[in-house]
Image (cartoon, helix red, strand yellow):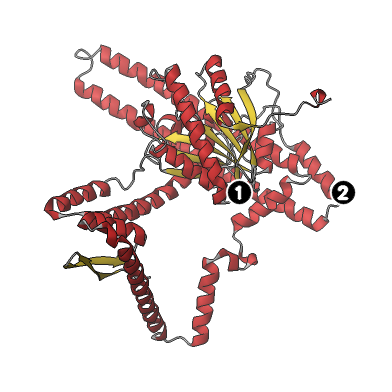
Amino acid sequence: MSGCVEKDFVFQFKNGSLKSCLTVPLRLPLECSARDLRGRLVAAHNLPCYVEDDLLQQLEEFIAVETAKLQDESAESSLKALDSGGKSAEDKAESWAHAFTRECTRYSDPEAANKDHQFAMMYHALIHSSALETLLNLEHTYAVANGDVINHRENARKNLEDKQHQEMESAMQGLGVTHTDEQVNTLAQKHFDSTQKLEVQWDHEVCNLQKTQRDEYREWVKQVHQDMEHSNGNRTTIQRIRAMSDAVDKGADDNNEPEEQPRLEESFTIHLGAQMKTMHNIRLMRAHPLDLCRHKPNKIGGTKPQRLQTALSLYSNTLCGLVLLVDNRVNAYTGIKRDFSSACQQSTDFHFPALQDQFSSIQEDLVRANSCRLARQAAREEEEENGSNGSADSEKSKSKSFSDLNRLQAGDFYITRHSNLAEVHVVFHLVADDSLRSTNINARNPTILGLRSILKVACRHDILTLTVPLLLVHEMGEEMTVQWCLKRAELIFKCIKGFMMEMASWGGTESRTIQFMVPEGISDEMFHQFSNMLPQIFRVSTPLDLSKAK
């Protein structure tokens, strides 16, 4: 529909012997339901309760009739604009069909799939074939080469910082003797420019390397897939692929790598629902969220089981997701966002855009989303405002909101996709604020409502494993006492249970795995308290001991 119109709704009713008439301008099409509008009108105009049913009935009839008229008028104007062109009916039908097939995926030509879709199909076929080992070894080789460049960048950055620190320290010691304030300021500006130049230089080198690796990898997958299709499983082709796997450089043995410490975790099987019960898995684990992201390739080659499972399920309906708590800016400059960006840069993503490219796309969508949010807020305030004071407050709120189009609100989240992380395909960046440090949050907190929306998205898009921070923090703080932790864990357990029970209405009947992650600073005793609390909230499946059944 091209636009909105404003129509006057007239409602007449009797109040004793007095006949009253209410006239309200309504903007059509209506953005809220007739029932909600009825409640607003009753509250705004102090209407008696006995007219609510009649008001609702007349509102629904008025909205239905006027909306239908508006749609008819819009359709008529569109048809007139279509008839006014110089094209014939056949040309118009052809262009209409072409636009429709381009807009609706289900009606598009399967042969018109884009290159990314074709690459995904080829990769999925190869990763489930005899070329599996070759693919993973090639990824391992690229990851080692990329890691070497990253290490060189870090060394160059550290050397420059040490050099600049010594120069600045020498200048500050000679301040007033060998250096003036102006010379110190000039030196600081010189250091800043040198740092920026170094960052740009190395970022450019890393981007070029990853682009080259991405192009080579995709071309290699295309060629091998074509060879396997033409050979139809010929033994010679399979032997050649295995020989290619042996020829891939697996690096030198490195026995100095520190062994990974096993995670402290405990798993449960639960049942949800009264009549139609569904079984799910709950895992409680103590780790840092980036431990699920960092991909540490073995110097001697080979692939770790977690990484192998992630690769096999990349294009499947068993995806893995992670909830990462971030601030209200879409960037990777500070805190855990910077560490996550570093984890993504450790190896090349051959399937999805780079993290910064995804951020750029999200930023554009964010501006549009905030503009729509602002428009709805302004329309709602315009309906509710009374008098000049309300109008001034509305303008103040509007000007403030326009300056924050690039910021998110608590409870908002954005999604990034990855193929180069250890145990994660999808990352939900959930915006949290300082209110989470308080002890008085409840189930209506925006961040908890954001968790509900994340679980809903996961349910509808085949994300069967989701990792959630149990305490809604990634690191321990001074205010996190024993009682604080227990109260927060109980709240999140109960909220997630309620959200999971809603999944039946969202269309999610598959068995899912919810991983509750606690910070690494949690003690063993506190971890076991969480573990003991979980069966009291969820209905845990108890195993049957057949030896006692005799």
Tell me the SS state at disc 2. helix
Q: Nearer the viewer, residue 337 or 289?
A: 289
Q: Position of residue 489 (x, y in %)?
A: 48, 27
Q: Which residue is mark 2?
A: 235
Q: Is residue 188 left or right of residue 453?
A: left
Q: Is 239 left, or right, of 108 in this rendering?
A: right
Given the image, on which type of amino acid does mark 2 rest? Arg
Q: Is residue 79 left or right of residue 124?
A: left
Name of the residue lying farthest toward the right: 235
Task: Work out whether residue 486 or residue 75 is closer to the camera in this orientation and state it.
Answer: 486
Q: Is residue 240 above or below residue 345?
A: below
Can residue 71 be seen from the camera position used here?
yes
Query: How dense is the environment of label 1, judged by Cα within 10 Å: few (below 14), some, or many (20 and up)?
Result: few
Q: Label 1: state its secondary structure.
A: helix
Which residue type carries mark 1? Asp
**Which of the two discs, 1 and 2, labels the residue nearer the N terminus?**
1
Q: Residue at x 51, y 72 (%)?
A: 99
The label shown at residue 442 is none
Which residue matches tag 1?
215
Q: Position of residue 466 (x, y in %)?
A: 57, 38
